[in-house]
């Protein structure tokens, strides 16, 4: 499968500026890029808002405003009333924005005269992804009034007030129905609350060559198959079940076995050739009553685990769902990492290390260093509360975005980290990070995280590299929820995975 990871790249505002600079330096005038951007936005207006007859274009002081000036001219046509409202007078503009404004010969006036209720559609060209300070004063009042008016907004690049780097709301922010951005998306389009503010996202090509992006070398990605499909392990025609790995999920005590069984079934549906539940003696009968294709072995203590590890075909383990935050969880985790096995830690097993996280991180870093492929041996899948238990200082750092927190934690832990939420972030110790956008609100249900843990384990068992394994699992988990629809409970998710695989390889 072809590596198309650059197709999934997200550009920070600084990287986008550098892409513009390199393209202009190579011979494409900046005003040409601006006109292409305006043309792409004009086409989106035509397709998404065909009945809009009264259109207001709000133009800020920079290149985002220049896009709005250029777009206003393109939107003028018979039976359409287009008016432009500017934050600064035309004579105060500079560079390409001034050129775009000079080419506009329609109705224009100061922003103070704008009344959102008078229009069918608002074009937001006030501030783009490079905004670095909170909106205040006249602009903040306008944004709040525009949101209250409920007139649909098409945002150019990013809704004004949203940070392109972090998705944070800077003071206040426009709530757009559609956002048109260029070349690639930005982190702020996918991180909350930016994701909720941008509405539908349209990414338009304006002629910046792929070679420019490769030269910049972005390290943030949208979590799409383009990022990992070339590394995904799929059954071969001449293969057998052991080629697809043997995943193991640890069960908790008799009264808490359901989470492990859901993870185990997800691992089996997720592609592992064999799956075994390691169960304490007291839970053997409970688990046996519910397991069929998933196998069952007793594992009571460290000695029994070491005996099982003599079978080198047991290559990927998941510890945590329903297990209990116990000394045994810490012992098992350290033993598995020392033995060179790939390990996912979720739920209780993460909490088990809250008083000694450095012991886990040291074990993970040593395990990665001793692996022939130098891949992280450990994948952590915390929600926000569990993340705070392992990384309390990072969790409360107000100057860090979610993606920054995940990156810093992954580097400290020597592990791939899956920081869960609507905007789940997957980060690797080498600095790569991906932001997920699949899933539905119905995933907020008991046991959904256990299923994700199982899908991660399936990919680890199939020897998918750890970062790509986690990315693929998170994407599949969300797509399974989308495929099922409303009324989802965790037990529904594994049965949807065959449909997701069929779409991936079909």
Image (spheres, grey):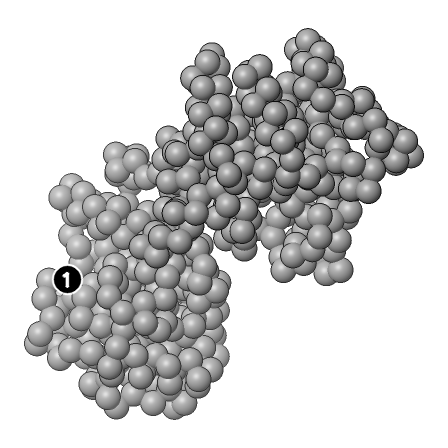
Q: Please state the total of marks drawn on the protein image.
A: 1
Q: Residue at x 11, y 71 (%)?
A: 93
Density class for disc 1 (Cα within 10 Å; few <14, some 14-19, many ≥20) is: many
Viewed as shown, does residue 5 lie left or right of 165? right
Give the x, y percent position of residue 501: 67, 36
Give the x, y percent position of residue 60: 22, 72
Give the x, y percent position of residue 265: 76, 35
- Quadrant (top left/top right/bottom left/bottom right) for the C terminus: top right
Query: In which image quadrant can residue 140 be found?
Result: bottom left
Say if 310 sits above or below 504 in the image: above
Q: Nearer the viewer, residue 248 or 199?
A: 248
Query: In which image quadrant can residue 469 be found?
Result: top right
Viewed as shown, does residue 69 lie left or right of 181? left
Q: Residue at x 54, y 36 (%)?
A: 353
Say if 162 sits above or below 204 in the image: below
Give the x, y percent position of residue 458: 66, 29
Q: Looking at the image, which residue sits at the far top?
A: 310
Viewed as shown, does residue 338 lie left or right of 168? right
Viewed as shown, does residue 222 lie left or right of 78? right
| Secondary element at tag 1 | helix
Q: Residue at x 36, y 71 (%)?
A: 173
Q: Nearer the viewer, residue 80 or 467?
A: 467
Residue 205 visible to an observer of this rendering: no
Q: Residue at x 67, y 14 (%)?
A: 306
Residue 92 visible to an observer of this rendering: yes
| Residue of label 1 | 96
């Amino acid at each position: 499968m072809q590596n198309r990871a650059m197709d999934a790249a997200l550009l920070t505002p600084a990287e986008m500026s550098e892409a513009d600079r390199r393209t202009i330096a190579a011979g494409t005038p900046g005003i040409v890029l601006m006109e292409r951007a305006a043309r792409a936005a004009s086409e989106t207006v035509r397709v998404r808002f065909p009945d809009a007859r009264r259109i207001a274009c709000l133009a800020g002081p920079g290149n985002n405003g220049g896009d709005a000036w250029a777009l206003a001219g393109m939107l003028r046509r018979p039976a359409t009333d287009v008016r432009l409202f500017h934050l600064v007078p035309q004579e105060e503009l500079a560079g390409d924005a001034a050129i775009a404004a000079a080419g506009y010969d329609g109705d224009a006036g100061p922003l103070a005269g704008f009344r959102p209720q008078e229009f069918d559609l608002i074009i937001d060209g006030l501030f783009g992804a490079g905004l670095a300070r909170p909106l205040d004063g006249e602009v903040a009042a306008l944004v709040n009034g525009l949101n209250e008016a409920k007139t649909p907004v098409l945002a150019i690049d990013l809704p004004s007030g949203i940070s392109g780097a972090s998705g944070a709301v800077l003071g206040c922010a426009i709530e757009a129905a559609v956002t048109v951005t260029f070349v690639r998306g930005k982190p702020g389009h996918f991180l909350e609350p930016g994701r909720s503010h941008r509405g539908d996202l349209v990414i338009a090509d304006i002629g910046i060559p792929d070679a420019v992006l490769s030269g910049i070398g972005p390290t943030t990605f949208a979590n799409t198959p383009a990022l990992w499909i070339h590394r995904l392990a799929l059954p071969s025609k001449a293969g057998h079940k052991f080629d697809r790995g043997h995943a193991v999920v640890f069960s908790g005590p008799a009264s808490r076995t359901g989470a492990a069984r859901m993870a185990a079934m997800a691992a089996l549906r997720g592609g592992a050739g064999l799956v075994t539940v390691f169960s304490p003696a007291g839970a053997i009968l409970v688990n046996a009553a519910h397991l069929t294709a998933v196998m069952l072995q007793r594992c009571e203590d460290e000695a029994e685990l070491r005996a099982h590890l003599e079978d080198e075909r047991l290559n990927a383990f998941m510890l945590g769902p329903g297990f209990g935050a116990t000394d045994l969880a810490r012992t098992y985790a350290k033993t598995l990492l020392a033995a060179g096995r790939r390990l996912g830690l979720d739920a209780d097993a993460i909490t088990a290390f809250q008083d000694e996280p450095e012991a886990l991180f040291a074990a993970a870093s040593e395990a990665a260093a001793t692996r022939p492929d130098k891949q992280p041996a450990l994948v952590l899948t915390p929600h926000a509360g569990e993340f705070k238990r392992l990384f309390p200082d990072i969790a409360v750092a107000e100057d860090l975005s979610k993606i920054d927190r995940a990156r810093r934690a992954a580097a400290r832990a020597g592990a791939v980290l899956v920081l869960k939420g609507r905007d789940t972030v997957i980060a690797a110790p080498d600095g790569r990070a991906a932001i997920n956008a699949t899933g539905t609100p119905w995933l907020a249900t008991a046991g959904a995280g256990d299923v994700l843990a199982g899908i991660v384990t399936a990919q680890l068992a199939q020897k998918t590299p750890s970062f790509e394994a986690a990315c693929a699992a998170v994407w599949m988990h969300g797509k399974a929820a989308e495929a099922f629809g409303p009324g989802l409970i965790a037990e529904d998710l594994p049965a949807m995975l065959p449909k997701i695989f069929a779409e991936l390889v079909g």
